[in-house]
Amino acid sequence: MGLSLDALAVLDAIERRGSFAAAALELDRVPSAITYTVRRLEDELDVLLFDRRGHRARFTPAGRTLLDEGRRLLVAAGEIERRVHRVATGWETQLRIAVDTLIPLSRVWPLVAAFYAECVARDAMHTQLRISREVLGGAWDALAEGRADLVLGAPGDAPPGGGYRMRMLAEMTSVFAVAPGHPLAAAVGPLSESKIARHRGVVAADTSRQLAPRSLGTLSGQETLTVPDLEAKLAAQVAGLGCGFLPYPLAADAVASGRLVVRSVEVPRPPGRVHLAWRAQRPGKALAWWIDAITRADWRFLALTALPSAAAPLARGRGAKTASTASRPARSRG
């Protein structure tokens, strides 16, 4: 027999129930079968697992070690069984979602809660979620390099080579913003690039590992302060540490409260498209659920604009058509 999951389950039952007889009741066996399993295991391992002196058998140190390690094996074996079941039923064992910092995580948590509820309803609650944060081209890089199965908020064009599916969530407007005390806040007229270049720019570092980093919108010769993400970029500009373009949905509260001033520029940044994207292959049930849930969610906040003439456009998250990069490339954010 040797070491088997059945023998480990017997040891587990003995410890939890307190006796061989109680373990036999739980496992629906006769007491002699429990005794035989334990003695056979001791013979196979050539160790004593129980100290039988006294009126109740107790685990020896070797027996306790086998019990502790054996319980880990029982847990692992149970997880393998569940994974096999999920593969057979079409539910992935893990789903990796990369979320660009354009998307507040507060918009993601309700989807996570709804997914868990769906998993419970469908007996798929062990599908593991792994959520990561990416900046600029990092979301596309995560998809291209296999670090993510789905990216939410991927900006601009997909990487060359095709093989992606995408749905546009919105066209996002960016504004050039500075703190009220920044020298550019009081500058006269639309700001030229030469005037902007004389002041420190705040840039968010692209998290791409293999793909070429996306343009950060910096100007030739401009001093820069590089920060880890868009939220840090916003905070740095509010603190007066530099200037730069910000997605208006991210900057809107700071602008409304007077912590940032929006300045017109001679060369404005055109609206950029924000996408949901995944690999062009048949999705498992968990990925299909997320694609559908994100498509049906309301992403109109991404299309918020500070320009009166552009106040009407809404995000096209609901009912958006799916595009394949092999046949319909996306336009760049600019």
Image (tube, rainbow, N blue to C red):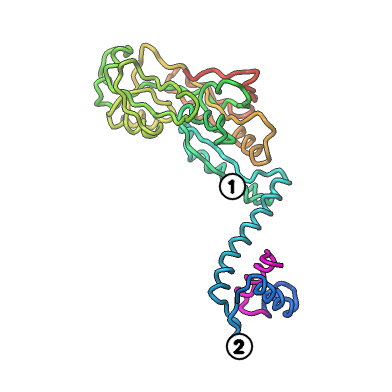
Q: Quadrant of the N terminus?
A: bottom right
Q: How many numbered marks does the figure carry?
A: 2
Q: Which amino acid does label 1 sit on?
A: Gln
Which residue occupies the extreme bottom position in the image? 54
- Give the main secondary structure of the magenta stretch: helix
Residue 322 forms part of the magenta stretch: no
Q: Going 58% across and 25% down the picture, which residue do you hit?
A: 168
Q: Could you classify mark 1 by the number of other residues whose Cα lies within 10 Å: few (under 14), some (14-19), or many (20 or more)? A: some
**Is-magenta flag for residue 5?**
yes
- Compared with 2, 214 (above or below) is above
Looking at the rendering, the stretch of residues picked out in magenta corresponds to 1-20
Q: Where is residue 208 in the image (x, y as percent from the top left)?
A: 47, 29
**Residue 242 horizontal/vertical position (percent):** 29, 26
Q: How far is disc 1 from disc 2 in space, using C-alphas?
A: 46 Å
Q: Mark 2 highlights which residue?
A: 55
Displayed quadrant of residue 174: top left
Tell me the residue that label 1 is attached to.
128
> Residue 142: image x %, image y %?
53, 32
Q: Residue flagged by tag 2: what amino acid is it?
A: His
In the depicted view, which residue is nearer to us: 40 or 328? 40
Q: Is residue 229 above or below residue 224?
A: below
